[in-house]
Amino acid sequence: MSETALPTPTAGMVVIGNEILTGKVVDTNSQFVCRELNALGVELKRITIIADDFAQIGQVTREFAAAYTWVFTSGGVGPTHDDITITAIATGFGVKAVRHPVLEQAIRSHYKERCTEDHLLMALVPEGSQLIDVPGRLHPQVQFRNVFILPGVPELFRSKFQAIKPHLHGHPMILREIFLKADEGTIAATLRRTAESFPEVLIGSYPNFLKIEYTVKVTVEAREPQPVTAAFDELVTRLRDIDAEIVRVT
């Protein structure tokens, strides 16, 4: 990292729901967040999946908030009995869960005479929260301190994450790729030596069993261009020295 570069922001994600842990619902939100944060240059450090457990939701979210720049939660923000994320987070941080007047007005306007006290549970926020407008959505996104409290429904999660993105400023990775017709065992020592020579660079190896074009993809990435270029050039030279067949590079 150059002397002028800012520290890379970090993130943690808390996926909440019995339905995830029992396999009734497949979690796709964490995969989405991985891709989005990587593109933004935010280093996602940890993802955890927990049950609809009041004490655990508050404790884990508080711990993540202390450890990372930003935290994203997924699930538990609807109107039913197991939607306890808001009140659990509020309790975990030692604040009240209160009705936000903007959310209450939006919910009452939407449901009109059909509005129930259960609908109004969706107007609750941890005291001190702020709202982020989500174009095309009734319900704004809730941010409590450095925690973004998101719904579990993938369509809603993704649209609300798009509204969050302008608030996230990272340090994107620079990536080079090498596609090979080789066996991982024959190139492992070469990758290891290169990784040892460039400790600031991440070198990955990914076998491919589905395409005829190549059998292994090797990635070289870091947050500064110079070490990526140096490691990439050295790795290509070393692979050629052991007669590894390089199909293409990007």
Image (spheres, rainbow, N blue to C red):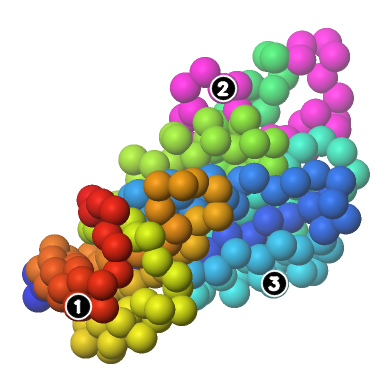
Report the residue at 45% width, 70% height from top.
183
Rendered image quadrant of residue 89? bottom right
Q: Is residue 30 visible?
A: yes
On screen, 37 above or below 138?
A: below
- Amino acid on which disc 2 is placed: Arg
Circle 3 packing at 10 Å, graded few (<14), some (14-19), many (20+), is some
Q: What's the magenta region? A: 111-139
Name the N-terminal-most of marks 3 and 1. 3
Furthest residue toward front: 243
Mark carried by residue 137: 2
Q: Give the residue at x 85% y 33%.
A: 118
- Mark 1 lies on a secondary structure that is helix
Asked if the residue at tag 1 contacts the one at tag 2, i.e. Cβ–Cβ closer than 8 Å, the answer is no
Give 243 or 236, whichever is nearer the viewer.
Answer: 243
108 lies above or below 84: above
Which residue of the protein is positioned furthest toward the top in this rendering? 113
- The vertical placement of 218 against 72, above or below, is below
Please tell me in which quadrant of the rendered image residue 223 appears: bottom left
Residue to which mark 1 is pinned:
241
Viewed as shown, does residue 118 lie left or right of 220? right
